[in-house]
Amino acid sequence: MAQTSLPDVADLSYEQARDELVTVVNELEQGSSTLERSLALWERGETLAARCEEWLLGAKERLEKARATESTS
């Protein structure tokens, strides 16, 4: 995973980040990568996981606001 060819994680949709994270985890689980590649994959995976969490927290917040608005109507 060359860092220069990968899109910026901040620009990824939830689905894109999730799908790439699955790919990263699968490659790490195979255990056939060099130490350097494994470290790069791990770092990318941590960043992708954080991006997914951002999306999920944002979605939860939107739902809570919609519910609050609905209950006050």
Image (cartoon, grey):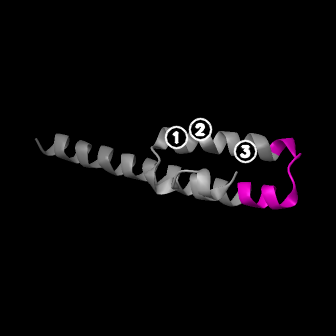
Residue at disc 3, secondary structure: helix
Residue at disc 2, secondary structure: helix
Q: Residue at x 66, y 40 (%)?
A: 22
Q: Amino acid at mark 2?
A: Asp
Span shown in magenta: 29-41
**Location of residue 67 (image quadrant):** top left
Quick check: 6 left or right of 35? Answer: left
Q: CA distance from mark 1 to mark 3?
A: 14 Å
The spot of residue 19 in percent (x, y) is 59, 38
Residue at disc 1, secondary structure: helix
Q: Which residue is mark 1?
A: 16
Q: Residue at x 63, y 45 (%)?
A: 21
- Label 2 packing within 10 angstroms: few (<14), some (14-19), many (20+): few
Quick check: 55 left or right of 36? Answer: left
The spot of residue 40 in percent (x, y) is 73, 59
Quick check: 24 left or right of 71? Answer: right
Q: Which residue is mark 2?
A: 19
Quick check: 66 left or right of 11? Answer: left
Q: Amino acid at mark 3?
A: Val
Q: Residue at x 25, y 49 (%)?
A: 65
Q: Which residue is mark 3?
A: 25
The spot of residue 52 in percent (x, y) is 52, 49
Residue 43 higher or lower than 16, as above or below: below
Q: Amino acid at mark 1?
A: Gln
By secondary structure, the bulk of the magenta-drawn segment is best described as: helix
